[in-house]
Amino acid sequence: MAKKEIPYKIYLDEHEMPTSWYNVRADMKNKPAPLLNPGTHQPMTAEELGGVFCADLVAQELDNDTAYFPIPKEILDFYKMYRPSPLTRAYCLEKKLGTPAKIYYKFEGNNTSGSHKLNSAIAQAYYAKKQGLKGVTTETGAGQWGTALSMACAYLDLDCKVYMVKVSYEQKPFRREVMRTYGASVTPSPSMTTEVGKKILAEHPGTTGSLGCAISEAVEVAVSTPGYRYVLGSVLNQVLLHQSIIGLETKAALDKYDVKPDIIIGCAGGGSNLGGLISPFMGEKLRGEADYRIIAVEPASCPSFTRGVFAYDFADTGMVCPLAKMYTLGSGFIPAPNHAGGLRYHGMSPVLSQLYDDGLMEAVSVPQTKVFEAAEQFARVEGILPAPESAHAIRVAIDEALKCKETGEEKTIVFGLTGTGYFDMVAYEKFHDGQMDDYIPTDEELQEYFQKLPKVD
């Protein structure tokens, strides 16, 4: 197929890597609702957020109007270690399925952290270093974000304190050791090292933890330790901004070969990889320049889009963070200790929540065993062992391709392969041994948490 010049060459360097991040909020008619102070219920100011986050990141978080943010040279130089990441056509999977659909995947696992998380980790660590901080604190679920941040902090000589969801800490010891190899301290959450951790353990003895719990602990340590700030691997506007490099590269590659996707699919936990993948395509959709079917895939055990409510809620279990308007299951919701890893979060990015509420994208939830069936099928024909999170997107990509087989439609499907699953072998072992279940919360269980949502006028 003949190559052609892409229409926005100005944003690419000589290696065809984007030189700016794209802020989809600039093209949104309905902007995401502001973060609220949990005490006053008034929009959080830059000064208030500056006590928790780095100053430059606060500016990015609050900017709803600037479409493109130039990527600092130091970050671009770091990106060149592993970017551009490959966009691959899944010829073998297409053949195995016998589908007329064309399937492409953007692979973000070709770096030491094993996932897309490094795209934002290096950016947040850079701004912390620029501000003269000593270190940062964070939470991690399956461990990809903690691994990425520890790598970025080692590169920039910053201290890194990670609170890892207890069930993942126990299920994924090797990822924990990678973090420690890069110099991070790793604490299973909830823990007895923080006041909020002690409170959660008192109320929920024996809990396996959640991202909401770990966020609370990381924030407490950040605000009480001089020279530290908190950083987050998903959900926030700033994170989706940094991750837009995924979608910009994807779109540049597709445009170069005159390929227009019909369906774009991403797994959804807090929204970092999905938001990054779809950003430039959603921008076209918002501007009326093109149309795409965009599908968010979440675990049936933690279905914030498909069964949650669109409301203001705490971003953390300990209720110390600002209130965010998002699709949520309630900050007290602690998901089952399954293998959805980084998708086990009670809420969804305010940006993606607004886009979903506006009907600009779809969402589906899938059970755990079906996800691992798809992961195994993909590994056997495409040669990459996918992370459980990524396998949610693979599941729906396969389902959509099989629909094309039934109808004879030659649709083009693009999905995000967020990372590799080589540190997730306990999950694969349980699947192969028939010890994996498909727990799904009942309506009654969810209603209990909905009733505890904060009352915001």
Image (tube, rainbow, N blue to C red):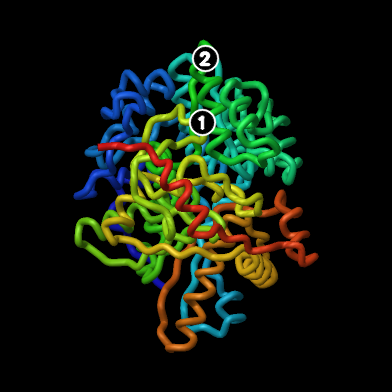
Q: Secondary structure at mark 1?
A: loop
Residue indicated by mark 2: 224
Q: Amino acid at mark 2?
A: Ser
Q: Are marks 1 and 2 in contact (CB under 8 Å)?
A: no
Local crowd size for mark 2, using a 10 Å CA cut-off: few (<14), some (14–19), many (≥20): few
Residue 57 shows which numbered tag? Answer: none
Q: Quadrant of the C terminus?
A: top left
Counting residues from the N terminus, which is met first, the one under dot 1 or under dot 2? 2
**Viewer-proximal residue, 202 or 266?**
202
Asked which quadrant contains residue 135, the reply is: top right
Residue at 66% from the left image edge and 71% from the top image edge: 377
| Count of labels in the image | 2
Where's residue 59, x and y in %? 32, 28
Residue at 51% from the left image edge and 31% from the top image edge: 318
Residue indicated by mark 1: 318
Where's residue 82, x and y in %? 56, 45
Where's residue 340, x and y in %? 60, 54
